[in-house]
Image (cartoon, helix red, strand yellow):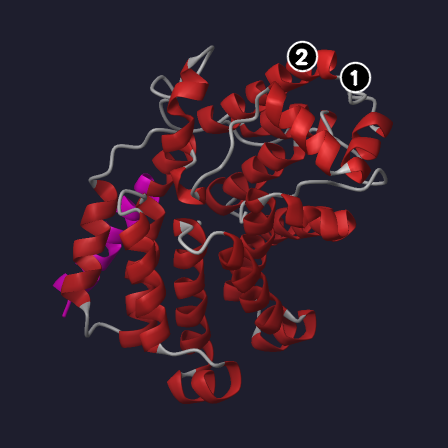
Amino acid sequence: MRRTLIALLAACSLTAVADDNWKPFPLDQSAYDYSGDKLRQAWPQLTRGFGDYPFPDADWVVSMASRHPQALERTVAAGTGFTGKPEEAEVYAQKLQEVWRLMFRGDFAQAKEQGLALGVGGQIPALFAQVIYAMFLVPEQAEKHRLLEEVIAYTDEAGELVQADTVAQFGRVYAKARLGEELSVPVVLKRGYTSQIPDELEALLAKQPQQPFALALYGGYEAGVIRKVGKLVGKMTYGVSADNMEKYFSRSFQARDDLPIGHYEYANALTYVYGDDQHDKVVEHLERAVAITPINAMEALEVAHAQKMLAQYQQKLAKH
């Protein structure tokens, strides 16, 4: 589960600088080759967590440019080589597809660098890569927070234009939700995350009621609030409940049950809300997560994370 990751646009004042000190992807990448037509063929499965997300071909580029003139203006100003002419769309689309390939392969630093250089469309996979990198490959909490806050800053600068893309919307709220889990309650309240997160998820689900990622994130958000403030205060002050948590995850699994992050997020949520009372179900969903064969780098990191969670949870149970 932005998230990321992941703004549609960044302001011209935010410089497209590569993070060349990022660590390389630590796992085998050989299975994540989506060169040539492989990307289009695998696209529905690669993006299944986002629901029906369009393939970024030349037609998509032309459509977005015509529907969002402000986005086109920023793309031109960024010197991407695309000025809105249909004959330029194919070249731009090929460059954009390459950024998505880099992201799915786990070449996150390159995806960010090349994506930001493309402006508008490229910033979607670029910041998606940043969210994934921050969540799974950054050991220092302060650096992880900085990277997630940078993603939010890009979307702040984008303003209403971020609403033009559901991945951008998700990346924004995913980053906030992950920060909300780790920051103190006073800081979360000061930033307004307790109202922003549900409002932004509601807006996203109004467009895509069955988006698996958004539904699982909503369930995880409800569980996270309960963990921090308890069931009573959570319900009275923030309107969250165990029942709501269960409903969101149920809807997510009905939409897709083959996403590793959905299963381990549910396992986390169960422990947040019920402690060890649902240990059988926790183990069941962690085992389901690790049984999924990943088809991209993000899912590989998610499966590895679920494996670590399962081992730790089993060790904990063995001590009791």
- Asked if residue 38 shows in the view, the reply is yes
Q: CA distance from mark 1 to mark 2?
A: 9 Å
Q: Is residue 99 positioned above or below 12 on the image?
A: above
- Asked if residue 19 shows in the view, the reply is no
Quadrant assignment, res 285:
bottom left
Q: Magenta segment range?
A: 303-320
Q: How many neighbours does mark 1 have within 10 angstroms: few (below 14), some (14-19), or many (20 or more)?
A: some
Residue at 61% across, 50% down: 148
- 1 or 2: tag closer to the N-terminus: 1
Secondary structure at badge 2 equals helix
Residue 318 forms part of the magenta stretch = yes
Give residue 42's position: percent from left, percent from top.
38, 24
Pointer 1 and pointer 2: residues touching (CB < 8 Å)? yes
Q: Which residue is mark 2?
A: 91
Q: Which mark is residue 81?
A: 1
Quadrant assignment, res 300:
top left
Give residue 246's position: percent from left, percent from top.
30, 68
Q: Looking at the image, which is closer to me, 306 or 160?
A: 160
Q: Is residue 70 positioned above or below 214 on the image?
A: above
Residue at 32% across, 44% down: 259
Residue at 53% across, 64% down: 202
Q: Is residue 278 positioned above or below 251 on the image?
A: below
Seen in the image, is 125 located left or right of residue 91?
A: left
Residue 180 forms part of the magenta stretch = no
Q: Is residue 320 positioned above or below 249 on the image?
A: below
Secondary structure at badge 1 equals loop
Viewport quadrant of the C terminus? bottom left
Q: Looking at the image, which is closer to me, 72 or 182?
A: 72
Question: Looking at the picture, which amino acid does disc 2 mark?
Answer: Val
Give residue 215's position: percent from left, percent from top.
41, 58
Q: Looking at the image, which is closer to me, 149 or 241?
A: 241
